[in-house]
Amino acid sequence: MGIELSPAYAANLAANIYDVKSAITREDFVDEYKNDMELSLASFASGVTGGFILNKPHVMAVFSSGKGKYKGQAFVVFKGTASLYDALTDLNTGVRACHTGTRVHQGFYYAFESIYQELNQFLRGLKGVAAVHCVGHSLGGAIATLAADWIKSTGAVAQVNLYTFGSPRVGMEMFAKKCTTRLVADNIYRVYHKTDPVPMVPTWPFTHVPTSSVDYLLFSPVSAIPWEYHKMKHYIKSAENAAGWAGMKTNRPKGYGQVAVERWLQSDGIVSFTANTLELLDAALLYVIEKVINATGIVLVAGFATYFTLLDRMAVFMAKAAKTTVKVSIWVHHLIRKMAALIGIVVKEGADLTVEFIRMVFNRVYRKIADMVWQAGQDINK
Amino acid sequence: MRRSIPFVFLLIFLEASAMSFFNPTKTCVFSAVKAQLTMNGEPLKNATVIRRWEWQELREEKTQTDENGFFELPAVFESSLSRMLPVELVIAQGLYVVVDGEEKKFWSNSKREPEENVEFNGRPISLVCELTNEMRINRDFGSRMNTLCTWEK
């Protein structure tokens, strides 16, 4: 085990960063961390060596060298923001190649891009730092993920730890894989409550980091307020009650195997919307995409102009795949038929799957999933 | 970047509104305050007290202490559609007094819940503040409070 923040310290930091927004409480934040960070009120919104508080239209952050107990370490902490929320539930969003080359959610890309110069400047000024802790809650967690991935890619620091609480999914599978490899899964502390809906979006093909090993699932009850367990006060309580990271460590729920996915795709039973269906659909989609790519070489995202949305790309990809060999196209037909059934549309055997039709199915299924996720229905807690 | 409220949030909002008898966006941004200010043990008479808070915008109001250093301020409520989003509710609260022409902060808090009187776990804000005391961070009530005041335990 290398250098790491305790769960309670990381959770409190992810909550306290919200207080830098107002001048009323900003000095309280600086006061609370005066023994741990090289911060002062004079460092607000300027690139002072050691540490500074950054204020951009969509991103607020604290970048600071550690001191005292945290000497030789550094902090990169992001505040969540309301301004990106609509992007999370919109499959018409674009994807962009991030600063380390793989594709991520466009909204997060632009948020990170807006603070990239300052982060670069901060990183260049660091001396004798062995580890950087990147921390964030909610959308702050998504930006912290991009920051951690980029910092590690520079080679400037040997160890980069990522701590996220209720973070949405940041990038597509290749990003998640590369980021996990780069940071090393053990240095990624992705904490989420089972009934927090934010980590469930954006849905496929976005994937969480880390892709393997473990994450930190905390069981939480269903609440009348759908996003009650997204609040930092519950994450702090869970973190403080846990016996360290080891106490919080839960094996990632086992995914669905190939046999289960194939059986589900081939079945004719009634398809209803439950959390289990959502997980199966996620698994089935990735299963079919991988099957198509491996068999045909059709790629999901390359070769399109950037103005194509993810929805467009998925629809074109599936429509192309549906016209390939029977061995592959049959699974595309099964998938689209299953998805259409979810929205009450029956697809006949041998029907022509056009881009427009597939796009409509994806769009309507996605909307229905978004509804279900946000309503945090009773099924989620089963 | 668009700032519109997503459709799904609207649905949840409408559902929540139908189920409740109150306005779900109504938020207590500062509970009622009663306090006595002293300086070196003597009541601070006729001093200007400033109450500031910041949720969507920074706002403030002023009052005066009486002959015995007491002042009172009523609760303040605001509404915002941001309550329909799964964003952390954060309201910065501060109490300041003008002494010798300079503002001095004697109480601040990061309010994270919409209800009234959550600053002190359901009890009204009732403080005794000796201004020569040091500011100290207190977490007894969940959120971070920074104050030189004392209160009835």
Image (tube, coloured by chain):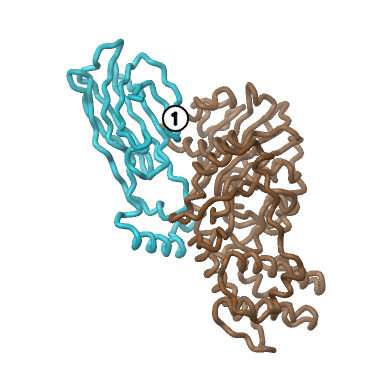
Say whether residue B140 is left or right of residue A3. left
Say whether residue A276 is left or right of residue B23. right
Could you tell me which chain the residue with mark 1 belongs to?
A: B
Q: Nearer the viewer, residue A284 or B53?
A: A284
Residue extending furthest toward the right: A295
Q: Mark 1 points at which residue?
A: B140
> Where is residue A291 shown, x and y percent of the image?
78, 71
> Where is residue A347 shown, x and y percent of the image?
62, 85
Residue extending furthest toward the left: B67
Q: Colour of chain B?
A: cyan
Q: What's the amino acid at mark 1? A: Asp
Q: Disc count in the image?
A: 1
Residue extending furthest toward the front: A382
> Where is residue A295 shown, x and y percent of the image?
82, 73
Q: Say which quarter of the image contains residue B75.
A: top left
Q: Nearer the viewer, residue A3 or A323?
A: A3
Say whether residue A143 is left or right of residue A286. left
Q: Nearer the viewer, residue B34 or A136?
A: B34
The quarter of the image holding the N terminus of chain A is top right
Residue sitting at x 38%, y 36%: B121
Say whether residue B10 is left or right of residue A128. left
Residue sitting at x 59%, y 33%: A9
Q: Colour of chain A?
A: brown
Residue sitting at x 72%, y 70%: A261
- Give the vertical position of A324 relative to B65 (above or below): below
- Give the vertical position of A284 relative to B141 (above or below): below
Residue sitting at x 47%, y 49%: B87
Q: Is residue B55 visible in this depiction of the protein? A: yes
